Image (cartoon, rainbow, N blue to C red):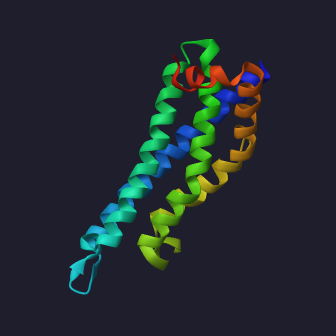
Amino acid sequence: MVREAQGRSGLARAALIAGAARRCVDLTVTHTASRVQFGRPLSHFQAVKQEEAKLIEEAALMAAAVDAAGTAQADPAAAEFAAWTAAAQASASVAEVTRIAHQLHGAIGFTELSPLRLATTRMWSWRDEDGGEHEWCQRIGRRVVEGGSDRLWPQVTGG
């Protein structure tokens, strides 16, 4: 019962983190499109485009893990592992999402007036609540060792 609650709580935090990451993407894309530097919007520079692509990729990865875990809740055997995986992925992606978003916003992203600050500070705190990335990965690792490595792929894919 406690383990199930921990898994569901981890999944809820992962969903919150994924939503905040989506907010970071929206704010960053809007900022780079409107901020002009050297006569061009920031979003027209190749280096900025590459970082935005990484940001979008990380947010999509978190969303996919949360969606997969949400779907797996119908199967009690797969639900726990899927929730742990989503929590681990969301926790792992926080650092990259916040790094890129703040880098592309510059110093303005940390000011009290910036909505980016609100999204990223919550992500940092949610990442560590209910255990952090390390704890979720330990749970996953123990499950894999207990079940044998030949069961890893079916557990991850739900097959």
Which one is in front, 104 or 143? 143
Which residue is farthest bottom?
38
Which residue is farthest left?
39
Can residue 151 be seen? yes
Residue at the location (76% across, 24% down)? Answer: 3
Which one is in front, 114 or 5? 5
Please state if 75 lies on the left or on the right of 115 as rendered: right
**Residue 155 lies in quadrant:** top right
Can residue 113 be seen? no
**Residue 80 lies in quadrant:** top right
Please state if 14 lies on the left or on the right of 140 as rendered: left
Please state if 7 lies on the left or on the right of 21 as rendered: right
The correct choice, above or below, for 99 with respect to 41 in the image is above
What is the x, y in percent for residue 95? Answer: 58, 58
The correct choice, above or below, for 111 with respect to 148 in the image is below
The correct choice, above or below, for 74 with respect to 53 in the image is above
Residue at the location (24% across, 71% down)? Answer: 44
Residue at the location (64% across, 48% down)? Answer: 126
Quarter of the figure that contains the N terminus: top right
Residue at the location (57% across, 12% down)? Answer: 75
What is the x, y in percent for residue 54? Answer: 41, 57
Which one is in front, 66 or 148? 148
What is the x, y in percent for residue 153? Answer: 57, 25
What is the x, y in percent for residue 34? Answer: 26, 71
